[in-house]
């Protein structure tokens, strides 16, 4: 799975007629100030990193003048937001926000069916929104999403009557992207109702199937491999695949008396370059040990091992690896060759990692 950066996701939304704020991508403070100049008013400067919750992490800043835009862009560029180095910022016209809504089309994991989600309580992490405030509806993948279905979801979400038609258009257009790009997720959060009465996508997430996306859009490939890192404050770095397995690993580290430094889920398609980047990100937290727990299915153990070996060129922190599943033997052989502790049993691996952390 790859997560497009916000400006890329917004590019796709714009193509299907969804309104996005005017703006541009900057790699330097100078560029940022030039874009702000063109916009000619207050702007928002946003770190382009493939993680959510940037606002809370200080990755979304405001500026009233081009000079200020240059300053805040300089602050962001080269800094780290949730473990990701910021090398680009998006400079956009600042919206006059009346309300923040939520709209998404996602592939239901268990059923593999598209599901449409909408809420009037957007702008915050959707996990924090109470269930009853989120309207949901499955879509028949063969028929596609029909306008009346979009309308019903919008209604269920409590969208005011006068905006139902606009909300329906946004959802229908989002479905075009979802379908056309074989996306796993197309999300607008917040979908802003401006004081001027327009619906504007203030933030966007598009997750694509890795193989399909790279085949059709090689330009998306290099910078968009995704993982999700949450800092937990301890000194045992944790990398695993799948949210469930990652949480279980975090819990087990605690059970064995260790202090988890983070939660990092590398997801389904853990390619060597992604594993390497994940290890570097965790190492940057200043951990005493990195515990890697991968259950290979689609993910191949030899790919994971290659990523670990590549990361070793830059990382001195000891690593403890539990690696089972597809191509397990090849994976173990590669790691042993490079002197890395590798386990089949998770508890043994956790115990070893905690021992190292406790010195
Ligand atoms: P995220 O934290 O990574 O999801 O980043 P968002 O782009 O969603 O921004 C977080 C929050 O910043 C939004 O929910 C808004 O409250 C605020 N924000 C973003 N863009 C604007 C803007 O143009 N104007 C104003 N007033 N607030 C904004
Ligand atoms: Mn957002």
Image (cartoon, rainbow, N blue to C red):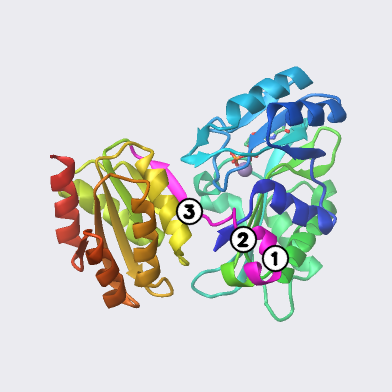
User: Which numbered disc flags the more N-terminal residue, 2 or 3?
Assistant: 2
- 10 Å neighbourhood of mark 2: few (<14), some, or many (≥20)? some
- Give the image quadrant in which the ligand numbered 2 is located: top right
- Residue bearing the label numbered 3: 227
Under 8 Å from ligand 1: the CB of mark 1?
no
Magenta stretch: residue 108 in it?
no
> Mark 1 or mark 3: which comes first in sequence?
1
Q: In the rendered view, does 41 fall on the left or right side of 72?
A: right
Distance of mark 2 from mark 3, alpha carbons?
14 Å
Look at mark 1 in the image and give the residue it sits on.
217
Circles 2, 3 touching at the beta carbon (< 8 Å): no
| Residue drawn at x 39%, y 75% as measured from the top left | 297
Q: Quadrant of the N terminus?
A: bottom right
Q: Secondary structure at mark 3?
A: loop
The residue lying toward the viewer, choosing from 251 and 270, is: 270
Q: Is residue 36 left or right of residue 268?
A: right
The secondary element bearing badge 1 is classed as loop
| Residue beneath disc 2 | 221
In the rendered structure, the answer to whether residue 244 lies left or right of residue 201 reads left
Q: Residue at x 20, y 68 (%)?
A: 344
Distance from label 1 to label 3 (Cα)? 20 Å
Q: Nearer the viewer, residue 235 or 158?
A: 235
Q: Nearer the viewer, residue 33 or 338?
A: 338
Q: Nearer the viewer, mark 1 or mark 3?
A: 1
The boundaries of the magenta stretch are: 213-232
Contact, mark 2 vs mark 1 (Cβ under 8 Å): yes
Which mark is drawn over residue 291? none
**Rendered image quadrant of residue 150:** bottom right
Q: Residues within 10 Å of mark 3 (few under 14, many from 20)?
A: many
């Amino acid at each position: 799975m790859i997560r497009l950066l916000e400006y890329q996701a917004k590019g796709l939304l714009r193509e299907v007629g969804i309104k996005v704020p005017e703006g541009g991508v900057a790699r330097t403070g100078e560029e940022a100030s030039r874009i702000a100049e063109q916009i000619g008013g207050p702007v928002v400067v946003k770190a382009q990193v493939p993680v959510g919750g940037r606002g809370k992490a200080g990755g979304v800043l405001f500026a009233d003048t081009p000079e200020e835009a240059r300053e805040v862009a300089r602050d962001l560029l080269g800094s780290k937001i949730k473990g990701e180095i910021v090398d680009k910022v998006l400079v956009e016209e600042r919206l006059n926000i009346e309300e923040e809504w939520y709209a998404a089309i996602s592939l239901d994991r268990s059923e593999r069916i598209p599901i449409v989600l909408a809420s009037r309580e957007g702008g915050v992490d959707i996990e924090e929104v109470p269930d009853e405030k989120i309207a949901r509806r499955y879509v028949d993948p063969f028929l596609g999403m029909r306008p009346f279905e979009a309308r019903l979801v919008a209604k269920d979400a409590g969208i005011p009557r006068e905006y139902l038609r606009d909300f329906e258009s946004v959802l229908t257009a989002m479905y075009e992207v979802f379908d056309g790009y074989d996306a796993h997720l197309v999300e607008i959060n917040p979908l802003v109702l401006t004081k001027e009465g327009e619906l504007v996508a203030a933030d966007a997430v598009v997750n694509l199937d890795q193989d399909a996306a790279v085949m059709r859009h090689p330009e998306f490939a290099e910078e968009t491999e995704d993982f999700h890192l949450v800092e937990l404050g301890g000194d045992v770095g944790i990398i695993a695949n799948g949210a469930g397995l990652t949480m279980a690993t975090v819990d087990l580290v605690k059970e064995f008396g260790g202090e988890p430094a983070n939660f990092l889920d590398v997801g389904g398609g853990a390619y060597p370059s992604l594993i390497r980047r994940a290890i570097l990100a965790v190492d940057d937290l200043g951990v005493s040990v990195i515990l890697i727990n991968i259950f290979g299915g689609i993910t191949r153990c030899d790919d994971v091992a290659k990523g670990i070996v590549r990361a070793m060129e830059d990382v001195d922190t000891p690593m403890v690896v539990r690696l089972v599943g597809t191509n397990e033997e090849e994976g173990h052989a590669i790691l042993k060759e490079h002197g890395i502790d590798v386990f089949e049993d998770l508890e043994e691996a956790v115990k070893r990692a905690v021992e190292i952390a406790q010195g």
